[in-house]
């Protein structure tokens, strides 16, 4: 089970993530220690996909007290457990958590693009600490076997990934400081 420790280059925040690959899909489980507007924040996440790599469940725990579950049907419908559909993210197949680079693994693994190919995606982008979920248009372009270009709006980053799709270098945002295959 690959385990990685990332550090946010600008803030020093840490994120420890484990990737578990099963015949039924994958699981990304992690803990982020960060600061949001000067307040310390601990985020625990557990993301599960189906066998096609489509995000189906996102469990989030903030500071050991707030626990929320975001559910997806694999066809682009999202809702908080027990809540109404989140129409702003309709059509999204993947989740993107602002506090971690872990979620870039989801489209990278699911898309399996050939080098030189790109895909435009709509993501369910979860903001912290308020857990707002908004739509985000994103583009993933495969540059080499271990390199991708990620872009959204005016922002671009080059991602260096391992064979499992875990990011080891995320331009000037995140870097892996420890890794166990």
Image: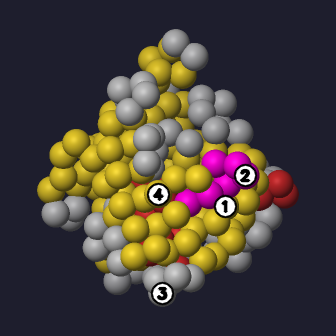
First in residue order: circle 3 vs circle 2: 3
Q: Residue at x 46, y 74 (%)?
A: 143
* In this picture, residue 83 sits left or right of residue 106: right
Question: Residue 87 sits in which quadrant?
Answer: bottom right
Residue at the top extreme, as displayed: 38
Residue 85 location (% of width, % of height): 80, 57
- Could you tell me how far apart the alpha carbons at marks 1 and 4 are, in whole angstroms? 13 Å
The mark closer to the camera, 1 or 4, is 4
Asked whether 6 or 149 is in front, the reply is 149
- Could you tell me how far apart the alpha carbons at marks 2 and 4 are, in whole angstroms? 15 Å
First in residue order: circle 2 vs circle 4: 2
First in residue order: circle 3 vs circle 4: 3
Q: Residue at x 15, y 56 (%)?
A: 180
Secondary structure under tag 4 reads strand
Q: Which residue bears the numbered disc 3? A: 114
Residue 93's place in the image compared with 83, above or below, is: below
Q: Which residue bears the numbered disc 1? A: 138
Residue 40's place in the image compared with 124, above or below, is: above
Secondary structure under tag 1 reads strand
First in residue order: circle 1 vs circle 3: 3
Is residue 154 one of those drawn in magenta? yes
Magenta-colored span: 150-155
């Amino acid at each position: 089970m690959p385990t990685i420790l990332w550090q946010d280059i600008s803030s020093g925040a840490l994120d420890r993530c484990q990737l578990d690959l099963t015949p039924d899909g994958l699981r990304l489980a992690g803990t982020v220690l960060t600061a949001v507007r000067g307040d310390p924040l601990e985020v625990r996440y557990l993301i599960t996909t189906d066998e096609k790599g489509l995000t189906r469940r996102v469990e989030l725990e903030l500071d050991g007290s707030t626990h929320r579950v975001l559910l997806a049907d694999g066809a682009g419908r999202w809702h908080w457990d027990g809540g109404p559909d989140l129409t702003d993210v309709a059509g999204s197949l993947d989740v993107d958590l602002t506090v971690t680079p872990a979620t870039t693994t989801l489209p990278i693994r699911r898309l399996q693009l050939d080098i030189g190919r790109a895909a435009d995606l709509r993501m369910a982008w979860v903001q912290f600490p308020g857990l707002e979920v908004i739509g985000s248009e994103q583009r993933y372009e495969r540059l080499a076997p271990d390199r991708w270009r990620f872009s959204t709006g005016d922002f671009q980053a080059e991602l260096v990934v391992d064979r499992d799709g875990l990011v080891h270098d995320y331009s000037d945002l995140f870097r892996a400081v420890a890794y166990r295959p």
